[in-house]
Image (tube, grey):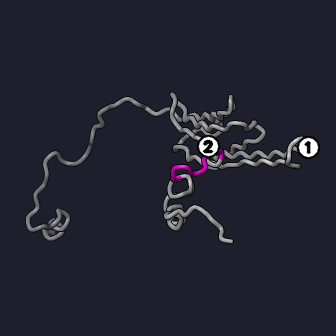
Amino acid sequence: MADISRWNPFAELAPLQRAFFGEDWPGFGRDDFPGSRRGIDSPTTDVYTSGDNVVVEAHLPNFSKDDIDLDIDGRVLTISASRHSREEDKDRKYVIRESSSSFQRRVTLPEGVDTDAITAELNDGVLTVTVPTPQVSASKRKIEITGGSSTPTMIDGGESAADGEEDEK
C-alpha cells in the first residue's frame, strides 16, 4: 500500500536555507502553506522593546511553569517546553490516552543586555521574559572633526602626496 503524504516543492531547499539563515528563520517548512498544521509546534512569540527593556512574549496555553525551561547562553535566550500526559478512562473505547507537546524557540538578544537581571513571568498561558538593556544616550549632537587641513591638496599626474614628497628628496 502506498504511503500518502503532502508534497512540499520547497522541502529540498530547507537544508540550504537553514545553512544560510539558521534554525530561527521562517521559511520553507511545512507551516508555510494554508491548511498546514499549526499549534504548539510553532507558538506565537513576540519580541519588542518596552522602555529600557527587551520583552519576549511566548504564548504557551496549557503549559505550567514546571513544563517550561529558560536558558541563556551568551546572548541566545532559549525557551523550551514539553508536556506529556497519560490518562486511563475505562468508560471510553480507548484504554490509554496519551498526549505530548513540545517546542523550542531561540531568540538572539542585542549586544550589551544584562543577562543577570532577566526576569520571567507566566500568566494566563503567556510567558513574559523581560531583559534589561543598557542605558544609551539618545540625544542628538554635533561631533567636531579635528586635525587635517581645511583645503584639499591637488596632485598632478595621479601621484599621491607621499610619492611626490619622496621624489623631491
Residue 18 spot, x, y in % from top left: 53, 61
Residue 39 spot, x, y in % from top left: 63, 44
Q: Residue at x 25, y 46 (%)?
A: 147
Residue 82 spot, x, y in % from top left: 74, 46
- Is label 2 in a helix, a strand or a loop? loop
Residue denoted by label 1 = 90
Q: Is 91 placed above or below 37 here?
A: above
- Is label 1 in a helix, a strand or a loop? loop
Bin the neighbour count of mark 2 within 10 Å (Cα to Cα): few under 14, some 14-19, many 20 and up.
Answer: some
The three-letter code of the residue at mark 1 reads Lys
Q: Earlier in the sequence, mark 2 or mark 1?
A: 2
Give the number of the disc on residue 43.
2
Question: Viewer-proximal residue, 33 or 134?
Answer: 33
Q: Quadrant of the N terminus?
A: bottom right
Give the number of the disc on residue 38.
none
Using the rendered view, name the quadrant where residue 129 is placed: top right
| Residues in magenta, as a range | 32-40
Asked whether residue 81 appears in the rendered view, the answer is yes
Residue 142 falls inside the magenta stretch: no
Q: Is 28 placed above or below 59 here?
A: below
Residue 71 spot, x, y in % from top left: 68, 46
